[in-house]
Amino acid sequence: MFRGREALEGTNPVNKKLAAALSGGAVLVLALSGCGDDSEEKVNAWAKDVCDQAQPQIKKRADAQQAIISTAADGKPADIQAADSKAFADIAAADKALAKAVRDAGVPPVDNGEKLQQDAVKELDATAAAYLDLKKKVDELDPKNQQKFADGLQTVADGLKKIERMDQEALAKLQSGELGKAMAKQPGCQRADTSSPAGGASPSSGKA
């Protein structure tokens, strides 16, 4: 009767993949970096407005990522389920708040600013909905059936890869050009550091 242990051993690597995908994927504005000359005052003001509101959301995402990493090594299925469910809910809430921050800041004072804003808000909202869907999938898993739980977690990890691409697309527009440089200068948009007791690497900074 050691099948459960074997299944659990199969669960942990999958959750490690989940943690790796989350920590290595797009983490929204905290991946922004840039060098270059001063941006115009209006652009900097817009970036500051967004980044000031983004800072607590960046921390929320980093904490959610850390929760998944912390249970990835040796967490029991029920612990993994609870941690992943809460993490996805927190990330969804952070994405919704980031979308609101971009919306409330108004149209960025750059070329095609209105379209940039609309696209970013739309995609952040869509990403938030996708994370809530992942939360639902995690909640529906049966932690008592460890083999099925491991299989279900793999499906969740596959879904996370698709959301990564959505995250990247949502932020690529804001990361570009003058706007990206202005946001990169703002303390509120700097990457949130997390410790990694389970050996997870914190996300690397973007290229300068």
Image: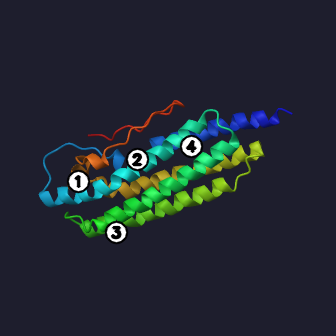
Mark nearest the camera among 1 and 3 is 3
In the rendered structure, the answer to whether residue 172 lies left or right of residue 143 reads left
Mark nearest the camera among 3 and 2 is 2
Q: Secondary structure at mark 1?
A: helix
Looking at the image, which residue is at 27% across and 53% down?
176
Label 4 to label 3: alpha-carbon separation: 30 Å
In the rendered structure, the answer to whether residue 17 lies left or right of residue 170 reads right
Question: Which quadrant would residue 45 be assigned to in this image?
Answer: bottom left
Q: Identify the residue under disc 2.
A: 59
Q: Identify the residue under disc 3.
A: 118
Mark earlier in primary sequence (4, 3): 4
Mark earlier in primary sequence (4, 1): 4
Label 2 to label 1: alpha-carbon separation: 25 Å
Q: Identify the residue under disc 1.
A: 177
Label 3 to label 2: alpha-carbon separation: 24 Å
Viewer-closest of 20 and 71? 71
- The amino acid type found where label 3 is placed reads Gln
Mark earlier in primary sequence (2, 1): 2
Question: Which quadrant would residue 140 be assigned to in this image?
Answer: bottom right
Label 2 to label 4: alpha-carbon separation: 19 Å
Q: Identify the residue under disc 4.
A: 18
Q: Secondary structure at mark 3?
A: helix
Looking at the image, which residue is at 61% across and 50% down?
156
